[in-house]
Amino acid sequence: MVKRKARVSAKAKPKAKAKPRSAKASPTTLSARRNAESREWEAQEDLRTLKRADEIRKDTKRLNAVQAQLRKEQEAINSLRRGIERKK
């Protein structure tokens, strides 16, 4: 078997420049995309919450139940606050 030497031409071709990696997004691009998606999801969730709040306001039974629950929670917070103030 005879080994052949590689030919070197007088006019060497310049190597092609590496293409930028556009297939893979950079971490900052991914982060920005995730932040944008997160903000969009949050806005959609807020819209759903506002729609539910309107439904609750229109339904007097549900609104009364919410107000009763609010009073219970306020009473519990106030009793804790009074207990803390007594210990001082």
Image (cartoon, rainbow, N blue to C red):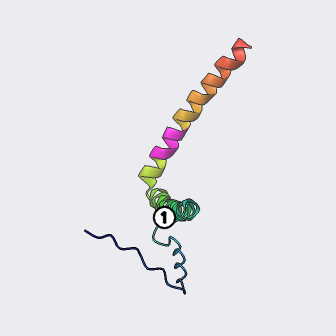
Give coordinates of residue 46: x percent, y percent.
52, 60
Seen from the viewer's position, the closer of residues 24 and 59 is 24
Where residue 73 sits, quadrant-wise, is top right
Name the residue at 49% across, 62% down. 41
| Residue 20: image location, x then y, percent | 53, 73
Nearer-the-camera pick, 84 or 29? 29
85 vs 49, left or right, is: right
The answer to whether residue 66 is magenta is yes
Is residue 71 positioned above or below 12 on the image?
above
User: Which region shows up in magenta?
Assistant: 65-70
The kind of residue tagged 1 is Gln
In this rendering, the count of numbered labels is 1
Q: Nearer the viewer, residue 6 or 46?
A: 6
Relative image position of residue 52 (x, y in whole percent): 45, 59
In the image, is residue 22 above or below residue 73? below
Q: Residue furthest bottom?
A: 11
Task: Indicate the secondary structure of the residue bearing disc 1.
Answer: helix
Q: Residue furthest front?
A: 2
Q: Is residue 22 magenta?
A: no
Q: Residue at x 47, y 47 (%)?
A: 64
Rendered residue at 55%/59% (across/down): 27
Most foreground residue, 26 or 46? 26
Question: Quadrant of the image for the N terminus?
Answer: bottom left
